[in-house]
Image: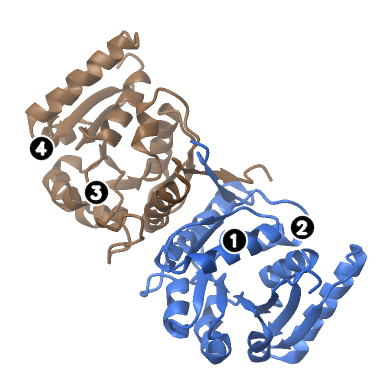
Chain colours: A blue, B brown
Amino acid sequence: MSEGKAVVAILGGTGGLGTGLARRWAEAGYQIIIGSRTQEKAEIAAQALRELMQERGVAEVSVAAMDNVAAATAADIAALTVPFAHHADTLRSVKAALQGKILIDVTVPLVPPKVARVQLPEEGSAGQIAQNILGEGVNVVSAFQNVAAVHLQEGQGMDCDVLVCGDNKEARAKVIELVEAAGLRGFHAGSIANAAAVEAMTSLLIFINKQYKCHAGIKLTGLDH
Amino acid sequence: MSEGKAVVAILGGTGGLGTGLARRWAEAGYQIIIGSRTQEKAEIAAQALRELMQERGVAEVSVAAMDNVAAATAADIAALTVPFAHHADTLRSVKAALQGKILIDVTVPLVPPKVARVQLPEEGSAGQIAQNILGEGVNVVSAFQNVAAVHLQEGQGMDCDVLVCGDNKEARAKVIELVEAAGLRGFHAGSIANAAAVEAMTSLLIFINKQYKCHAGIKLTGLDH
């Protein structure tokens, strides 16, 4: 908190994407809370993150471990990184704790086994579902859906832009700050309805990764004319 | 036809996107048929294209003008560049003429006035609607939805990739050839269901263009690892 930076909770933060984001934000000086369904699982991920920060010579880190509800309660901003199957349940469990805050929804509504095929939910997108469940008291902002966990885990720059969607412009701007803190470029990309495009694009990237044996991302061009 | 290249019809080919594609493919040596609802409108666009090719010193060009049904009948491959409001009607009118051929669907299902907001149709995408209307006898391949007409009109390279979706891989490969002939990179991006991602992305690019006062495109990264 030395620079007054926000306390960021990562709900369902024990997987590849969650620990990748936690690592980036811890390095950037944010206070991190790893949330999980149980305190124990959260503590294992938090301990691993503390050790990684020590290895990398990051002196002052604040990494706590809590269950998801406690993490959402203690946080200024929360990110949600759970598989789509746990998305709605997790949101309902933290709804009260998130009122007045920003939720960064990283969820991609993949429907196994055909994860390389776009299968958007009836509501339009996971981001829209989150906004519907949490209600108007929470600013849902979708981001990071096209970034591969493997890229966040590596300690380097990534060649993938983050398209940031949400109904509230100030909330989007705060998330863009976190995107930049994670070492990526973030862009205002419209209302939460627009999360559909970014979530759907993940299935195309999965297809392209298989087809061309690569780890594809997307980048905006033409920004300077 | 000097190199045995396909005859390409551009249905609804009198607008910015249609004439832009026609110009690129004419320069690449394809025989072009401009299709429109009336022969007269098609002829005006065809004449403008012939004059442009003469200006640019392209010696041997073949540009015909026909109504949409005649154009679809005479073509080896057809591209559809009509506003979404005319999409289904035009497809029904050329259904018989396109059997056994490839239809390149360039349509983006924008719903004015909120064109910067993703509003995908119930069927999932314009590409899926086209496949549903035309039936299994036609290979629908969606492409070019993220490329701005203004970029196609300029005689230079464009910094925007084309994500090519369709259920038939060979048909996609033929469309990728045409993408490359137009001076762009084209990529296999999965089944026609995946057109939803690319069509939706156009609304995000429109939002980004307004927000950042630019002409944005997207490009794939990470292809070489």
Q: Label 3 sits on what residue type? A: Gly
Residue B47's place in the image compared with A98, above or below, is above
Residue B212's place in the image compared with B27, above or below, is below
**Could you say which is closer to the camera, residue B167 or residue B90?**
B90
Q: Label 1 sits on what residue type? A: Ile
Badge 3 and badge 4 in a common chain: yes
Disc 1: which residue: A176
Dot placed on the residue nearer the N-terminal end, 3 or 4: 4
Residue A224 percent across, percent down from the top left: 52, 38
Dot placed on the residue nearer the N-terminal end, 1 or 2: 2
Give the Cα distance between marks 3 and 4. 24 Å
Disc 4: which residue: B37
Disc 2: which residue: A154
Residue A131 percent across, percent down from the top left: 45, 78
Label 3, residues with CA under 10 Å away: few <14, some 14-19, many ≥20: some
Inspect this view and state whether residue A139 appears: yes
Question: Residue drawn at (24%, 33%), measured in percent from left and top?
Answer: B10
Disc 3: which residue: B137
Q: Classify residue A136 as left or right of residue A100.
A: left
Circle 3: element type: loop
Give the Cα distance between marks 4 and 1. 46 Å
Q: Label 2 sits on what residue type? A: Glu
The image quarter in which residue B113 lies:
bottom left
Circle 1: element type: helix
